[in-house]
Amino acid sequence: MTARKATTVAIKKSTATDAKSYNPFEIAQQQLDRIADVLGLDEPTRDLLRNPVREYHFSIPIRMDHGGIQIFRGFRVQHNDARGPCKGGIRFHPLETVDTIRALAMWMTWKCSVVDIPLGGSKGGIICDPHNLSVHEIEQLCRGWVRQISRDVGPYSDVPAPDVMTNPQDMLWMLDEFETIHRGKYPGFITGKPPSVGGSLGRKEATGYMVILTVREALNELNIKPENTTASIQGFGNVAQYSLELYHKIGGTVICVSSWDPADNKTFCCRKKTGIIFDEIYSITDPWGTINRTKAQELGYEILPGEAWLEQDVDILIPAAVENQITADTAPKINPRVKLVAEGANGPTTPEGDQMLANRGIFLIPDILCNAGGVTCSYFEQVQGNMNYYWEEKEVFEKLDAKMTAAFHAVRDVARRRKLPMRDAAYVLAIDRVARACKDRGWC
Ligand code: NAD
């Protein structure tokens, strides 16, 4: 990771996560309300599930390299822990809002439940842009976040992990701070660590690879061979990169990827109709998934506007960046050839967008199923850490494949039996399990 201090740009509140026009937490609550009706949940259960059981807001003072103090805002939201300790990533993003974190925490509860792992849901974040921080400042932020929350997280209560713009090194600094405070070794406290210090093999690939595993199962349902398909991906960070890698291995061709450049707060796409060459694009991408536009152009890629990824003449769309991308405004721009949307990102489709995809007969793999490979592998890492016994990579991928394939078909079965769209089916399965756990514990 390189220290990049230059380009501090005032970030306009006009991108995808615009809090004024779009509130992910309200959307998450609406989704819950609809499924609560389908399941006939009683009032106390709805009330319990509509809101986080706990949330923490705090300030993190950091001495910056120039000597002055800057205060950063941090959060941890624990949505529900009836099925087990909370689990959820930590985001570093300049446009982060507590409502985004609340929504993501709720989606984590459903995600752990849909793949049937014994965990609840949480999420955390710090409002910051790591592009404008030195390595030392990022380390201080990671340690500062843990100092503020260390009494309320831990291997048996709430286990953090990486998410947007956080990485294995950040997780290791966080673990080190936690172990210093609690005076012991707690490798199960945090997941997504480097494999040399207790990280699970396969974790960095897990989310993207498992996105493609669900694509494989969906294509099978649609009677389409992967080698005859093309795809367009939004984003080129962790999830997008490994999705692209495995999709190419199973014979597909990605023709377009996109990226966000914080230097001018612009999103853009890189397209090559003959197929993106992974090594080429990866070599000009920074550690946070920002592709160098000028170099991409020099390598023969067409540079297109940020939304162009969903207009491409392809079979599969994989949103793998941020929330609120397939909306009433953008869904009509989706190319008529698209047959499958695989939600690598969390919450990329609004309810209106969802309806439009359904009207067009597009098969949707909902986020809580599609990108659940990440948390499933994190769970494996937690288990390995608590046992202090680590598995070979082959064993990790075999276990992931088994869990994800079973979850895909469990959702597909509910969809068939109850005549529901895939998203609703995933929610019915997940919310029913969580509601039962709450009832069995006597919480509602
Ligand atoms: P990342 O930070 O590695 O990459 C994010 C990518 O999205 C970068 O290429 C960035 O340039 C791009 N981007 C950021 N803002 C954008 C915008 N407004 N428009 C278009 N592109 C934008 O993040 P990631 O870990 O790959 O996560 C991507 C999504 O997947 C997020 O929704 C995250 O919550 C979800 N997710 C991640 C994991 C995981 O294991 N990393 C697991 C489950 C879900």
Image: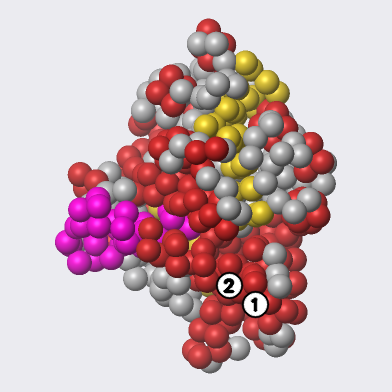
Q: Out of 382 and 153, give the one closest to the viewer.
A: 382
Q: Which residue is mark 1?
A: 417
Residue found 72% across the figure and 45% down from its top: 326
For the residue carrying disc 2, how many other residues have a C-alpha within 10 Å: few (<14), some (14-19), or many (20+)? some
Residue found 54% across the figure and 78% down from its top: 434
- Residue 430's x, y, as percent? 56, 72
Q: Secondary structure at mark 2?
A: helix
Q: Is residue 216 left or right of residue 311?
A: left
Q: Is residue 324 left or right of residue 107?
A: right
Label the magenta part by its dominant secondary structure: helix
Report how far apart the C-alphas of labels 2 and 1 lie in the structure: 6 Å
Rendered position, 332 above or below 185: above
Q: Out of 415 and 102, give the one closest to the viewer.
A: 415
Q: The residue under label 2 is which amino acid type? A: Asp
- Residue 397's x, y, as percent? 32, 54
Regarding residue 141, the answer to whether it shows in the image is no
Rendered position, 23 above or below 338: below
Residue found 34% across the figure and 71% down from its top: 156
Regarding residue 356, the answer to whether it shows in the image is yes
Q: How many marks?
A: 2
Q: Out of 390 and 226, give the one closest to the viewer.
A: 226
Quadrant for residue 429, please give it: bottom right
Q: Which span of residues is magenta-colored?
A: 372-400
Asked if the residue at label 2 sits under 8 Å from ligand 1, the reply is no
Q: Which residue is mark 2?
A: 413
